Amino acid sequence: MKLLATALTIPLAVFTQTAQGQMRDNRDKELTCQQGGGGNWRQVHHCDIREQTNSSTGRIKADPGRNGGVTVKGWLRNDVLVRSRVDVWADSDKDANTLMSQIRVDSSSGVISATGPVDAGQGGWSVSYEIFVPRLSAVDANAHNGGIGVSDVDGAITVETTNGGINMARVAGDVSGTTKNGGLHVELTGATWQGRQLELETKNGGIAVSMPAGYSAHVQAETVHGGLYSDVPMTVTGRIRRQTIDGNVGSGGPLIHVSTINGGISLKRS
């Protein structure tokens, strides 16, 4: 049996988040029209924040459409608040207003979706969500060109995006996430993973996982083209491979599995 303290250092900047206790009661509305939008500087850009409050069904499914990201936050209320940032861009103010009037966001029955013109000519549109849900909620979020973040939620969580990163903080349950082009950032809290497993995968992007001192889990971390770095003591058995970590942190526990093809992996104390 061997003790793995440090492997290779990844050749890119590592970003970690500091764990500050257990799940939080999120109330701050952070999605605004001050963030950047689409289109080019010659076009007219309009932005609108829309809000919808619904009863919780215990499960949400969110898809912003072709462009836009999803952020899901847990809170202690029993209802669901969906905040949508709608951006449009066009060659004239009139065209932008017309396009804005055609964007629809529906959040009924726990299914959150955005629809608009498939062909907007020289213009375009995007919708991003900031969703507040009861902590014990199931989440299914899909994006195409945008990142996904989930924090302070305990449930069956499945997220998938094509072009965008995935951020997880203070989550629990049966959690999986996949992106093709984007990094993964995970903040673990407590003494061990509360749920069946955490499994995250990216094709092109680095991975940063932070965990508090005294944390216990079975950790598998794999990269094809990238380095590995760990300052987390871990016991491993069998063959130690250059680009794979497979072992127990602390006394072991539920599986935490992260993998990338093109990118480094960092396991850090928070």
Image: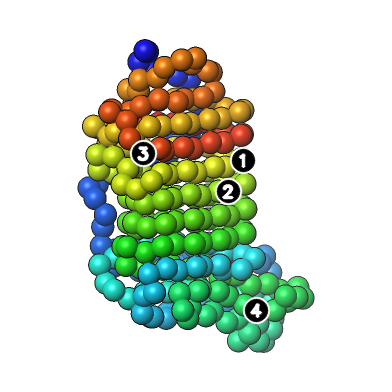
Per the image, label 1 sits on a secondary structure element best described as strand
The answer to whether 27 is drawn above or below residue 167 in the figure is: below
Q: What residue would you read off at disc 2?
A: 179
Given the image, on which type of amino acid does mark 1 rest? Lys
Per the image, label 2 sits on a secondary structure element best described as strand
Is residue 133 something one can see in this rendering?
Answer: yes
**Residue displayed at 62% across by 53% down:** 162
Q: What residue would you read off at disc 3?
A: 254
Q: Please state which of the two labelled residues, at mark 4 or mark 1, is closer to the viewer.
A: 1
Q: Please state which of the two labelled residues, at mark 2 or mark 4, is closer to the viewer.
A: 2
Given the image, on which type of amino acid does mark 3 rest? Pro
Per the image, label 3 sits on a secondary structure element best described as loop
Dot placed on the residue nearer the N-terminal end, 4 or 1:
4
Q: Marks 3 and 2, how far apart in space?
A: 23 Å
Q: Marks 2 and 1, how far apart in space?
A: 7 Å
Q: Marks 3 and 4, how far apart in space?
A: 42 Å
Q: Is residue 20 left or right of residue 267?
A: left
Q: What residue would you read off at disc 1?
A: 203
Q: Please state which of the two labelled residues, at mark 3 or mark 2, is closer to the viewer.
A: 3
* Disc 4: CA contacts within 10 A as few (<14), some (14-19) or many (>=20): some
Which one is nearer the viewer's eye here, 180 or 173? 173
Residue 233 percent location from the top left of the image: 32, 22
State which quarter of the image contains the N terminus.
top left
State which quarter of the image contains the C terminus.
top left
Dot placed on the residue nearer the N-terminal end, 2 or 4:
4
Q: Quadrant of residue 53?
A: bottom left
**Residue displayed at 51% across by 24% down:** 244
Q: Is residue 181 left or right of residue 120?
A: left
- The answer to whether marks 2 and 1 mark residues whose Cβ atoms lie closer than 8 Å is yes
